[in-house]
Image (cartoon, rainbow, N blue to C red):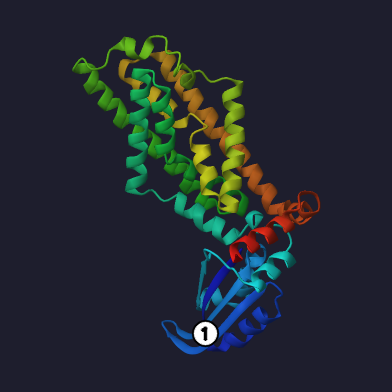
Amino acid sequence: MLVHFRLTVPSDLTAGVRDLLLDHAATTNLMVQAGVVLRPAGDLVEVDVAREEAGVVLTALRDLGVGDRGGIVLTTPTGAPFAEARRLERAAPGHPDDAVIWESVESQAYAGAVPTLSFYIFLVIAVALAGIAVVTDSAVLVVGAMVVGPEFSAIVAACAGIVLGRWSLVLRSLRLLVVSFVVAVLAVTLLALVAHATGLLADTDVTRPRPNTGFIWHPDAWSFIVALLAGAAGALALAIERSATMVGVFISVTTVPAAGNLALGLAVWETSEILGSLAQLGANIGGMLVTGTLLLLLVRTTWPWLVARSERFLGAGQGADQGAGQGAR
């Protein structure tokens, strides 16, 4: 798997950039077009880099000043069916699916901590779905609420901020989590009060035994263990850019369902439901923050060592070669 670099380079830096890319063993398809860039004025340099080494090359380019004075755009080709790409994959340590580009991780983390209108709307909808799931005792709606909820992006952004030392990102993420959940719970509580006043919602809808959804406000050791595992899985998915895995994390923890139950508990003022939901919500978020941070710290410190040695035991390099060969056919 290759990463395509498109670089806007000031003319006085082009020679250094060209030499860097020519000398690096993990690059191919290097192209330099002098004077074609108008804003900012400079040269256009394009190159393909083995994904395993993309982070190293990116760091070297930034050290040369390309990031400050020019431009760096990274894209991932949908395929690279040529012999040189396969050679680079064989030569690069580890497997491209395990490669971590920390600049990309940081960029995704900042994007996940932005307090957008859509973030708030999705969370309100998710908490409302969770409230309906409580009333109807529907496990299917609980899963739906989990999928719709956007909160994990803020949780994993806080983890990344801690590991990368971006404390403003940590504060922004935690503020988004707190404020968005408060807004969503209050909004659904108001809706529940309206439903209660009109007879659509009764106290017994919240307090009666609910065999399919009662677990969302009964925190126990297993709930916390699930949160720990989900935090680790989500942090690793962020690092290696596995969006499908992130969806699996969304439907494994009961943050949004607990918030929905909290809103209904507030509406009918059932203390046990309120306290149980708060405990569940806190345990889930706290567990994910802890293991998400620890997993990213592990990736930050020892991942290259682990990936390089995985080839010996897992045959990762052979798998990458076979995958490239299939793409070429």
> Residue 123 location in percent, x, y?
37, 38
Residue 156 seen: yes
**Residue located at (35% from left, 40% from top):** 122
Q: In this rendering, is residue 268 above or below 126?
A: above
SS at mark 1? loop
Quadrant for the N terminus in the image:
bottom right
Query: At label 1, which amino acid type do we have?
Result: Pro
| Residue lying farthest to the left in this orientation | 198
Q: In this rendering, is residue 35 above or below 294?
A: below
> Residue 259 location in percent, x, y?
41, 28
Q: What is the number of callouts on the image?
A: 1
Front one among 64 and 240: 240
**Residue located at (71% from left, 53% from top):** 303
> Residue 305 location in percent, x, y?
77, 55
Q: In this rendering, is residue 184 above or below 157?
A: above
> Residue 98 location in percent, x, y?
66, 54
Quadrant for the C terminus in the image:
bottom right
Question: Which residue matches tag 1?
Answer: 10
**Residue located at (81% from left, 53% from top):** 312
Front one among 118 and 241: 241
- Along the horizontal axis of the image, is 169 left or right of 185? right
Residue 183 seen: no
- Along the horizontal axis of the image, is 259 left or right of 66? left
Residue 211 occupies which quadrant of the picture? top left
